[in-house]
Image: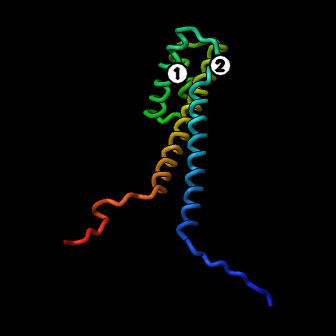
Amino acid sequence: MEKFNFKENKNPQEENKNTQEDQEKKIEQELKSIKENLLNIKTEKKTAPLNNIMKRDVADMKSYIMQLHEENRITIPYALNKALNDFGYKNYNDRELLKKIILEDFKESKKIKALEKRFKELEEEKNKLKPKKPTQLGIDFPED
């Protein structure tokens, strides 16, 4: 016959603390990596040479594109082409340069939103893991 060696769990609270601490450490590490990613995305420099007029137009075009996209329910690439036409960009090289910059900005903003959402979720999860301090309502006070 085989022998089974069952270990009795003498202190289940201690095991619970260890797993809770492990979860907190994992959450902390993920929060740290998200912060680093956000910093990297926000501090990356664009290498495209833009003159002052194009810089101003890029900002105006982004808001115009979002307006077209939300109000008229058209896709972003189509709205981008419409914006380039409406702003009077006929030169192929300028159009391609502006398309590249604006689409990169949209992708970056999407990444930033996703990372910020994940960051908030982790913060909430971290707060749930922390042991709650007893409040006056939760404590039974002895009667005099």
Placement of the N terminus among the 4 image quadrants: bottom right
Vertical side of 128 occupied by 92: above or below = above
Question: In percent of the image, x 61 and y 30: which residue is there?
Answer: 40
Furthest-right residue in view?
Answer: 1
- Nearest to the observer: residue 68 or residue 39: 39
**What element does badge 2 sit on?**
helix
State the quadrant of the C terminus. bottom left
Q: Position of residue 100 (x, y in %)?
A: 63, 23
Q: Amino acid at mark 2?
A: Glu
Residue on which the image places disc 2: 96
Going by the numbered disc 1, the residue's amino acid type is Ala
Q: Position of residue 129 (x, y in %)?
A: 49, 56
What residue is at 68 percent from the left and 81 percent from the top?
Answer: 6
Image point (61%, 40%), residue name: 33
On the rendered structure, is 78 left or right of 6?
Answer: left
Bin the neighbour count of mark 2 within 10 Å (Cα to Cα): few under 14, some 14-19, many 20 and up: few
How far apart in space, not on screen, are marks 1 and 2 (Cα)?
Answer: 13 Å
- Counting from the top left corner in percent of width and height, residue 81 is at 57, 23
The first of marks 1 and 2 along the sequence is 1
Within the image, what quadrant is residue 50 found in? top right
Front residue (pair 105, 37): 37
Please give the name of the residue rendered at 51% of the width and 34% of the height, measured from the top-left corner. 74
Q: Is residue 2 above or below residue 135?
A: below
Residue 99: which quarter of the image?
A: top right
**Furthest residue in direction front, as rendered:** 144
Q: Which dot marks residue 83? A: 1
Element on which disc 1 rests: helix
Labels 1 and 2 touching (C-beta < 8 A): no
